[in-house]
Image (cartoon, rainbow, N blue to C red):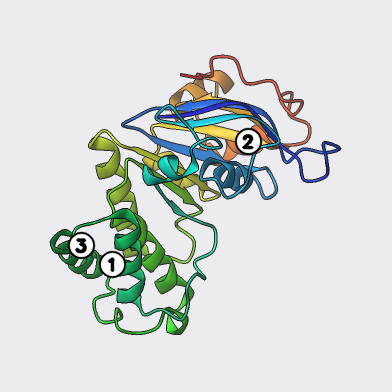
Amino acid sequence: MISIDHVSKSYDGGKTFSVSDLSLEVRDGEIFGILGPNGAGTSTTLNMLVGVLAPTRGTIKIDGIDVAKDPVEAKRRLCFVGDTPDHLLRLRGREYLRFIADIYGVPADVRAERIARLAEDYGMAGELDNQIKSYSHGMRQKMMIMGALLPNPDLWILDEPMTGLDPKASWLLKQSMRRHADEGKTVLFSTHVLDEAEKVVDRVGIIAHGRLLFVGTVDEMREHFRNNGSLEEMFLELTGDDSPLAGGEVASGAEEA
């Protein structure tokens, strides 16, 4: 489980905040989607969760482990797909996957089976011996996703994971996310593809202006706004500058546990 307790992030010594007083719990066995417009603070939030950035204030715990106090143990429990797939480009695909397996201590016999299955599923079997720098953006994204799935972590954190994926790979990713959550593990992802989020999330959090505005199910959001429209329409209503929640009040009926 993820616990975020009154977390804020400032890059200028506290004059302005990219994330402001954010509190949230993400449960085991669920897919939680974070939605927000560009610059809302979603990537900053995920980067604090995985230890890439340190919060200015507040505490983040993964399965009760403080990310700041015990970062290595916290990171053992998660895999992260960032917002760019341009990593370790000189490695061949197979070398990259073996590197990830070494970091997480995946046994040799287990890794071989998982790499073969993931490569087949994501259409990358014929590319594993090529350098990642030769891949298209979509192929690099597939490789990052395969690397995150390979250790079978308790927590899977994904920043805009659908970007650059072809329809089949996008479908496979959503199936992988659902299967992961159904095994009692946790998926946390950010997205701007609102219709896709609507189809896959168990709960959703809306962030705008660095603040958490709503937490709950899509149905709860619809009920709150007395609106049968799409998630996109509700999202625009929530995050607009004239929204009554723009000042940071979490919508009534939102859950924190």
Looking at the image, residue 115 lies above or below residue 156: below
Q: Amino acid at mark 1?
A: Tyr
Q: Secondary structure at mark 3?
A: helix
Relative to 43, is 89 on the left or the right? Answer: left
Sequence order check: which comes first, mark 3 or mark 1?
Answer: 3
Q: Amino acid at mark 3?
A: Arg
Q: Are marks 3 and 1 in contact (CB under 8 Å)?
A: no
Location of residue 244 by image quarter: top right
Q: Residue furthest top?
A: 253
Sequence order check: which comes first, mark 2 or mark 1?
Answer: 1
Q: CA distance from mark 2 to mark 3?
A: 37 Å
Sequence order check: which comes first, mark 2 or mark 3?
Answer: 3
Residue positioned 56% across, 37% down in the render = 68
Residue positioned 43% across, 40% down in the render = 74
Front label number (2 vs 3): 3
Q: Secondary structure at mark 2?
A: strand
Residue 237 is at least partly visible in this image: no
- Residue indicated by mark 1: 122
Location of residue 212 by image quarter: top right
Q: Could you say where residue 60 lies in the image, as x and y percent from the top left? A: 54, 31
Relative to 59, is 90 on the left or the right? Answer: left
Residue positioned 49% across, 61% down in the render = 163
- Residue indicated by mark 2: 207
